[in-house]
Amino acid sequence: MTTVQVQQRLADNNNLESCYTPIIQSGGEYTLKLSAESNDKLMHYGTIICSLGARYQSYCSNLSRTMLVDPSKELQEAYESLLIIQNAIIEALKPGKKLNEVYAAGLEAAKDKPMILDHLVKNNFGFLTGLEFRESTALISPRSDVEVVPNMVFIVYVGLQGLENLAAKDEQSRISAVLLSDTVLISAEGVNEVLTEKAKSRIKSNVIRFKEEAETSHADDNKENNLGEGLGRGKRSVLLQEQTRNKTTNEDKRKEHQKELGKRLNEAARERLADQTGQKDIKKIKKSNISYKSYEKFPKETEVDKLQIYVDRRHDSVILPVFGIPVPFHISMIKNTSQSVEGDYTYLRVNFMHPGSQIGRDQLQFPNPLSTYVKELTYRSSNLKEHGEVTAPSSNLSTAYRLIKEMQKKFRTQEAEEREKEGAVKQDKLILSTAKGNPKLKDLFVRPNIITKRISGFRYTSLRGDKIDVLYNNIKHAFFQPCDNEMIILIHFTLKNPVLWGKRKYQDIQFYTEVGEITTDLGKYHHMQDRDDVQSEQLEREMRKRLNQVFQNFCDKVVRQTNEAFDFDVPFNELGFFGVPYRSSCTLKPTSSCLVNLSEWVRYFIRS
């Protein structure tokens, strides 16, 4: 699987969650623990520590970085030393090694720098992760004797705290800390894979400098002033003009190149739009889902009065009690639900859609995206049944969980059907012909048992009586492929506009008949002079010839009755070649206007 495919799957999946609230620390107050919380103070531009954890399909990961703004030389050296310690720990995580040996390798890397060793957080250097964010039995600590196994995933977590900055100009910059954390996959052989390596940890990528830029610009201004005083105002302008005339900077070259590229793109777009004909696509604005338009439609059920969870199937809504008030939520606003049993209690967790919850998808339109939204609600109910009760109180949560899942499935199916109908075009009514000599083809199968030519198009009728109409004015390409060197004979139509048949829309439709056996019994004894085999081969040749003749007559009659306004394109077998347009190898055949492969489904063609 390529990187692009992985990114698409991550973006399209709805199972991406946060392990904990992201932690931002600055201003001399640092707690190098995952249980730390961000304070309400404004960010101080000195040392900034950022930590975040993500959970994808219940599997956890973690990332921590330290941003240094105009750092001192000592602080930069401390950062580089911590990076060396982290790399030593990652290299020591090899299959067969124990975690206390990995811990010792990290301390060994810090022994050369006693000042760093005094400030190093030595409790542990990370832990095993997976479905549980932190496996307490597998810490990279001096007491752990757990053995490293291939395909384990560790979070390497190292930090320095209590670093003093003697050159600090304010009180908040006097105490600093450095924290680095990455998620590492253990390889059976070779170098371990750092899963969070895209967020670069080198010091060059995590240092922001303002002083040097300000000093450089100030020096340039002073230099220009000195030139002006020494040469005079007139001579200085002459010198600048000469320099501008003879020196072309990279920025000027880039701008010229961008203008040339923009001109080419505009010309290509103008030619493409000139060739296109048809109506412009008008994007339909989806209406917002409203549970109840008036209070009179609010349900008066017993569960609502008792402040229990009630699932209203009629209005696709779920009524949840919030602070003693029944509040309706439309099913489209519920992201997912989960149920768990812990001891004598059942927990129901409801996650809601909110701005930013849908990554890389067609995001839900929120009327006020800057407002405060409820992210999740958790309800708890007892599993113990009191005396005189028929069911336990937790039965309401179990029933609500099941009904919400069913309603979500039904609602998403309806949405998928509506999306299928969006691009479909309603065809004109097929005009039936009363003539007896209409060309017909029998015993056909349809792909995505009679096809009959009508006045304005074709009609396919199955044995169950289902009808599929294909109109002439909606056919973009029509192909007839004889059964020469093929196991099927077919007629294929590519439509101008997709048409809805059943509950799905199609832009390609194919009618075919099998000529011979696609499978062969290899265990059967064959003889070269066996009369049965010779006779069966002769019958197959005659059948191929007869089917080719029947289909050819059908196509000729259609062309004649439409006054040659409609024609079938036949692929050239002699010019065919092998290719892999879609996952598997197949034979590609050119026609007068296209390059096609019609024998296999999914079909493939390129228009010239």
Image (cartoon, rainbow, N blue to C red):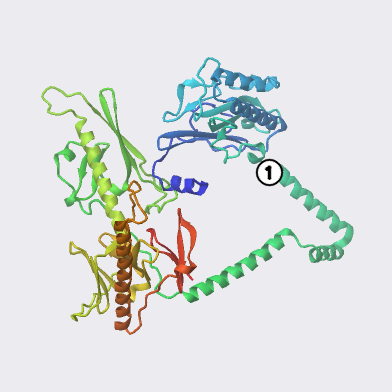
Point 72% across, 46% down: residue: 214
**In the rendered view, would you say 315 is above or below 194?**
below
**In the rendered view, would you say 49 is above or below 449?**
above
- Classify residue 444 by image quadrant: bottom left
Point 54% across, 30% down: residue: 188
Residue 431 seen in the current view: yes
Asked whether 304 or 267 is in front, the reply is 267
Relative image position of residue 160 (x, y in whole percent): 61, 25
Total numbered badges shown on the rendered structure: 1
Residue 24 seen in the current view: no
Q: Is residue 13 left or right of residue 201?
A: left
Point 28% across, 52% down: residue: 413
Residue furthest top in the image: 143
**In the rendered view, would you say 408 is above or below 442?**
above
- Classify residue 179 by image quadrant: top right
Point 21% across, 50% down: residue: 315
Asked whether 17 or 48 is in front, the reply is 17
Kind of residue sitting beneath label 1:
Phe
Residue furthest left in the image: 388
**In the rendered view, would you say 112 is above or below 183?**
above
Relative image position of residue 309 (x, y in whole percent): 22, 38
Relative image position of residue 605 (x, y in whole percent): 44, 65
Asked whether 352 or 150 is in front, the reply is 150
Circle 1 residue:
210
